Image (spheres, rainbow, N blue to C red):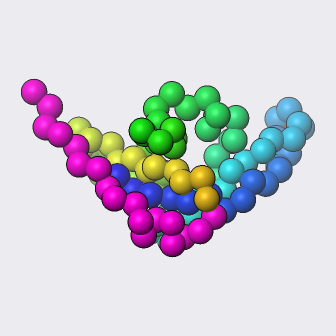
């Protein structure tokens, strides 16, 4: 599982509704950045044992989606990249 850490929240204007939308910006461990609608993150159904959202990795390649396992990224609610250094990655158990 990949990791990303919170950078900041920004406000943008939705081009359709013309309303304000809050986006959470994250820095991926691969060096890239991405943003997601903050309200989506509040409603995300899947979280880890520490209530951190787990989402499909936005940097997965097309080939990754052909595999049976989709890459995921865990979102850390901090803006310190060194916080990722202390993360101990979990191990997926074989499924029967």
Identity of the residue furthest to the right in this view: 18
- Does residue 22 lie above or below 28 as drawn? above
Residue 49 in picture, x, y percent from top left: 42, 38
Given residues 95 and 67, the one toward you in this image is 95
Q: Give whichever of 52, 71 is nearer the camera.
A: 52
The image quarter containing residue 69 is top left
The answer to whether residue 75 is seen in the rendering is yes
- Residue 93 is one of the magenta-drawn residues: yes
Residue located 32% across and 56% down the image: 89
> Along the horizontal axis of the image, is 29 left or right of 44?
left
Q: Quadrant of the rendered structure where residue 34 is?
A: bottom right
Q: Is residue 90 left or right of residue 76?
A: left
Prevailing SS of the magenta stretch: loop
Question: Residue, x 41% and y 66% (percent of image)?
Answer: 86
Residue at screen point 35% across, 48% down: 71
What x and y, as percent, mark residue 32?
53, 67
Residue 56 lies, in percent from the top left, at 44, 43
The relative height of residue 95 versus residue 36 in the rendered view (above or below) is above
The verdict on residue 8 being magenta is no
Residue at 51 percent across and 66 percent down: it is 83
Residue range in magenta is: 79-96
Q: Is residue 93 left or right of residue 11?
A: left
Quadrant location of the C terminus?
top left
Percent position (x, y) of residue 21?
80, 41
What is the tally of numbered marks visible in this picture?
Answer: 0
């Amino acid at each position: 599982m990949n990791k990303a850490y919170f950078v900041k929240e920004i406000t943008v204007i939705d081009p359709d509704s013309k309303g304000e939308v809050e986006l959470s910006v994250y820095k991926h461990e691969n060096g890239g950045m991405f943003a997601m609608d903050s309200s989506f993150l509040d409603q995300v159904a899947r979280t880890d044992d520490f209530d951190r959202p787990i989402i499909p990795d936005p940097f997965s390649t097309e080939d990754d989606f052909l595999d049976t396992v989709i890459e995921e990224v865990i979102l850390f609610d901090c803006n310190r990249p060194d916080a990722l250094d202390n993360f101990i990655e979990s191990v997926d158990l074989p499924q029967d």
